[in-house]
Image (spheres, rainbow, N blue to C red):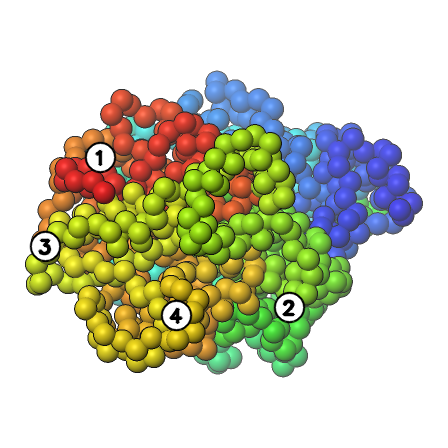
Amino acid sequence: MSELEAQLRKAVRGEVGFDVTSRALTTMDASNYRRVPLGVVAPHDADDVAVVLEVCRDHMVPVVARGGGTSIAGQATGTGIVLDFTRHMNGLVSLDPDTRTAVVQPGLVLDRLQEAAAPHGLRFGPDPSTHSRCTLGGMIGNNSCGSHSVAWGTTADSVRELDVVSGRGERLRLGQDWDGAPQGLREVVDGELARLRTGFPELPRRISGYALDALLPENGADVARSFCGSEGTLGIVTEAVVRLVEAPRARALAVLGYGDEGAAAEAAAGLLPYGPLTVEGMAADLVPSAHVLPRGGAWLFVETGGESEAEARARAEAIVRAADVVGSTIVTDPGGQRALWRIREDASGTATRMPDGSEAWPGWEDCAVPPQRLGAYLRDFRALLTAHGLRGTPYGHFGDGCIHVRIDFDLLTEPGVAAFRRFSEELAEVVVAHGGSLSGEHGDGQARAELLPKMYGHDMVRLFERAKGVWDPDDLLNPGMLVRPAPLDANLRFSVLPREPVDVAFGYPADGGDFSAAVRRCVGVAKCRTTSAAGPAVMCPSFRATGEEEHSTRGRARLLHEMLAGELVTDGWRSTEVRDALDLCLACKGCRSDCPVEVDMATYKAEFLHHHYEGRRRPAAHHSMGRLPQWLRLVARTRTGPLVNALAAVPPFAWAAKRLGGIAPERDIPRLAARTFSRWWERREKAPVGTGGDLVFLWPDTFTEHLSPSVGQAAVRVLEAAGLRVALPPTVRWRTPSGGGEGVTVAMDPVSLLRGRERVCCGLTYVSTGQLDRARAVLRRTLDLMEPVLGTAAPVMVLEPSCAAALRSDLPELLHDDPRARRLADRVLTFAEALERLAPDWTPPRVERPVVGQTHCHQHAVLGDGPDRRLREAAGLAGELSGGCCGLAGNFGFEKGHYEVSVACAEEQVLPAVRGAGEGAVVLADGFSCRTQLEQLAGVRGRHLAEVLAEGLGVSG
């Protein structure tokens, strides 16, 4: 243990982490930059902060304050000690509705303050798109703004007082009239009054540099305001008194359509006299599906407020009448507004991919010009992009003249990095020519600080250096930011990644087959760090259960990045740090849909486990549950199901089985069905079915086949009632397909005859445990069995959502070299999709009952639940299903050591929803894992939608 670490552990009450994982998680923020810290400290209180500064000053080790780690200019990274305020110093100290103020700690997430203020009709004005995970300390450090800045300004406009520890350890209380100013600051300002009065551009989003003009006497000598935007270079905030504003009782959102972004930009400033709350702009390039928006190629999101819905709508209508638009819509429904705002908020992640899938990066994320100059600036900006052969899609705060954009810089090669520098220097000159600020929201950091002389001139920058020297004479706090900056093209996070593609099992088609590119998808916007799953969202249940960064999608991606880099994580695929971080990943695939850049951590986890255990002994759970289809098929073939059930009911036998199988002792072993689904299918008396119906193959997944055949039986009854012909996939290999459906004559593979019947399998359990060689073998055998089906036009209906998702996504990515994989994936339908597509005129029975339950996470993330919603509505099943994850997630919740996290995930949404259900409510759970979790934790029987409809038809298996 180093002397620095030893002293910090002895003196600090909070956590001190010098381990590989702690350091790896903080090497990056949401910028292009990477720095490896010596250690991370989570201070318990202001005394801890002071002690850390004292110890680090003695060792000449720099200190960087970090909140949510969503900074886009690199200012939340450093080579010394990183202070993580999110773990302990994250509280709301007090809230006074009468004075409309709140006292907050720096690690408090903005949404938690908004939730506390809302019952009083109040809110904090600034609201960045990262409001669900950014912290008040980070907002103060960057002087953050957000979409409502046209109404409520920047964070500096909302700060009353700040408790700060300076670089020399002084405890200061910053306010107006020089309150809390360190000795010597007033003298610096008094000697430069003329320069301070003339050297700052007048525009609403001037964030670059130090706000020394706030110290002018005519501005109240406001030391707290001047401190905002200093990016942790002047002092460490330990507490803040912030101003709250009155929230409108009602809001309306007018979405205005324009022909292109230039027209939208030209129009934005003209709407400001109408007093809107927002004037946000974005173009069609950033909208995955524009059908929810009015006609146009670019849009302004203009929000209005009022005492009533009618008043808010009237103001929105006045704006629409005044705007010269090609299309418009006004939304007053809060749910509809949230859905539209999600499109805008996700743009920061969506913009990291160009329409053709190529990568784009920050660096010039938030320049700002006077709003009246925005149209002209955008034209010059576009011209510069064209001149450099670059692409980017601007969006952002058009009403404030602040533009966000990600650009397809080549940051992987030396020529590309050199071009990045040239473009940056030229764009800085364009911004300054329009009277703008290099940063309009996110701060300068390393991305722009080097270019501040172009904006302010060398004399003003030297004045910034003098101010920094007064506050932090030892240059202890976040050195290399704002003054004496590091070069903008140094410390790029991509430089450490391997230049040649890594040998991997999955195809990663969206990333050109390159695992490094897949890992690079995570840009750090940290939507996965949201502490509550809003609406149908799933990502990231393990983070919400533990609150630990390493259990977030971003944290895991950071560790994978460091694994590929090989500097901190030095043992590659054998890394225990990466393994431990991925251990609590439920493979729910929520990140695949909820992450703006579609990081697929479930696939990355399977890939890692495949390599990590290659040629090594695997955990017992990988054998017991990873090979579940194999064991259950053996039980069925030997007809020992009753014996297995009987032994599982005897505590000593159950204890021994769970211990040997790596299963959590708290779990009950599910009972096997007395008769498999396939056996029921073979022996049932088939009712006459019309010959005119479409043929559909029902996939006998492992769970339906062996554990809940009643679901398969119900599905058959419903499908046949809808006029469809149902068949099961073949169970012997076929040499030559000769048709499809019943009554097909084929030549059989003699090897298969010796083995007995084989069954199709989606390979899910092998994939989730990283047994990818075995998964490939199983899937190739499955494709062989499915040859005759693929020779027909018949779709394949899969009842178990996780199996359907595996066939639709994992199969073609794992067998990317087999064209049959894509053909089968394209045939896969869910139960509701099959009815909607193949029997569109069929009317389901009217069940007329309320429903509760949870949308399966794989259905949310991969399959989509639109057809299910429509089918439930047609059947009179009223109510919304919750989001989140049930927490069992296949083998995850059964594995030893996962029980507590599994329960915590279930307690977030689904269990409270089920417990609060009214009498007569149907508990819907299409996944076997979801049904098992409900039964074991709540004593409730969940049902597949097929079972509910079959009951409504008056039929059963």
Residue shown at 14% from the left, 37% from the top: 954
Are discs 3 and 4 less than 8 Å apart at CB?
Answer: no
Q: Between marks 3 and 4, how big is the CA–CA gap? A: 31 Å
Mark 2 surroundings within 10 Å by alpha-carbon count, few (fewer than 14), some (14 through 19), many (20 or more): some
Query: SS for tag 2?
Result: loop
Mark 3 vs 4, N-terminal side: 3
> Can residue 625 be seen by looking at this rendering?
yes
Mark 1 vs 2, N-terminal side: 2
- The residue tagged 4 is 753
Q: Please tell me whether mark 1 or mark 2 is closer to you in this view.
A: 1
Mark 4 vs 2, N-terminal side: 2
Q: Which sits in the foreground, 65 or 2? A: 2
Are discs 1 and 2 less than 8 Å apart at CB?
Answer: no
- Residue 17 falls left or right of residue 494: right
Q: Please tell me whether mark 4 or mark 2 is closer to you in this view.
A: 4
- The residue tagged 1 is 878
* Residue 14 at x, y percent in the picture: 75, 33
- Residue 677 falls left or right of residue 416: left
* Residue 760 at x, y percent in the picture: 38, 62
Mark 1 vs 3, N-terminal side: 3
Mark 1 vs 4, N-terminal side: 4
- The residue tagged 3 is 688
- Residue 473 falls left or right of residue 325: right
Residue shown at 84% from the left, 37% from the top: 9
- The residue tagged 2 is 494
What's the amino acid at mark 4? Leu
Q: Between marks 1 and 4, how big is the CA–CA gap? A: 49 Å
Q: Between marks 1 and 3, how big is the CA–CA gap? A: 33 Å
What's the amino acid at mark 2? Phe
Are discs 4 and 2 less than 8 Å apart at CB?
Answer: no
